[in-house]
Image (cartoon, rainbow, N blue to C red):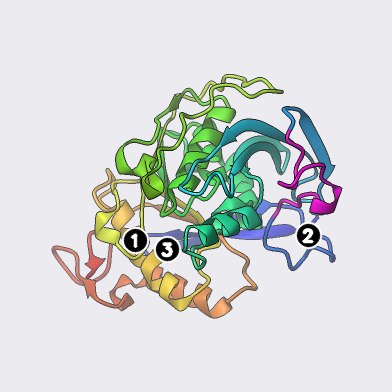
Amino acid sequence: ARQRETREAMATGATAPFAARCATPSPSTANRRHALHRPSRATSSSSSGIPRAAARMAWESADPLVRYRTFEELGTDLPHPVSDHVPMHMFACECDCDGVKVRLVLPESEDLVVDVYSALGRPDDDPHWADLWHGSVALAAAIFANPDVVRGKRVVDLGCGLGLGGIAAAMCGAKEVVMTDREERALWCSLAGSVANGLKNVQPLTGETNEPDGVALPPLPTHFPCSEIRAHPSKCVVSAAKVDWFEPDAAPNGFDVVLACDVLYTPEAVDAIATLVLRLFDGNDAGGAGRFVLADPPGRFPENHARFMALMKDPTKIPGWIPPVGGEDGVGARGRSG
């Protein structure tokens, strides 16, 4: 298997390679962005597409990134205003991150999430958080191969989705991991996945974040019907916060490491992420300098990659940049864009 390159950008402007060994998709799946391949609905014994039995079900993945995996129904649904019409069934699966097995909690399918959003009258909402992306597998593999990048650090998983990168950081000894996404159900999945991997200090969602569309989400699972949760020695504190990339001033800050994958898909996102990354570093113990670890397919939207790297090297080019106190050289992350 060839190596997939994961890029690392420093908030101070320096860049360095950060390689992650990761299997290359087979020709039949090379154009798929997701790493999980679920069974066809035609093979299912229920209308939901997966048998409604609390039993471990196994399928062979079409993608070598996720070899022979298992799906386990949790017996838990994520409620929403139209749950009676379109229930969102939840499952656990096991993902192979270059030899390290990580458990994730996720909805039955991305298609199901599309159906839920449509039933809620929001057909344009983004459902992609509900599936596993190749970039997140590469990111997690890189963290497991280089644990010192996160060990003892405050880490934020930007646009966490199912939370694979943040879970890997917590398992590798990060001091704190904050999962961030604009979708509350993604945050619930990322925290549930943290529990599934035996992490002990996982903080539940609270307040409005725990009540998307006015419906409270269930408590995080403490056991799984067909498998055992094995305690992990990490003492990392894992929590979650709702963050919109385009509202950087509302985001938490003071982080040492920012993790992200598959985020540079539009020019608008590039500028927003550049602004947000500097905000996330602001106020940390290193005076605003930090490490940004990005996993993104290098052949997709190369112009976005080039622009992002240019903005990281010279933050003064970010639209609306406000210089840091004490100078306009763009050093550190104390400046921001307005």
* Residue 276 circle label: 1
Q: Is residue 316 visible?
A: yes
Please tell me the numbered disc located at residue 14.
3
3 horizontally vs 259: left or right: right
Q: Amino acid at mark 3?
A: Ala
Overall secondary structure of the magenta section: loop
Q: Nearer the viewer, mark 1 or mark 3?
A: 1
Q: Position of residue 265 (x, y in %)?
A: 53, 71
On-image quarter of the C terminus = bottom left
Q: CA distance from mark 1 to mark 3?
A: 18 Å
Kind of element beneath mark 2: loop
In the rendered image, residue 42, in percent from the top left (x then y), is placed at 84, 53
**Residue 40 seen:** no
- Amino acid of disc 2: Pro
Q: Nearer the viewer, mark 3 or mark 2?
A: 2
Report the side of 291 relative to 69 (left or right): left
- Residue lying at 80% horizontally and 44% vertically, measured from the top left: 67
Q: Position of residue 187 (x, y in %)?
A: 46, 44
The label shown at residue 224 is none
Is 106 one of the magenta-colored residues?
no
Q: Quadrant of the N terminus?
A: bottom right
Disc 1 vs disc 3: Cβ atoms closer than 8 Å?
no
Q: Which mark is residue 25?
A: 2
Q: Residue at x 29, y 60 (%)?
A: 248
Which span of residues is magenta-colored? Answer: 35-52
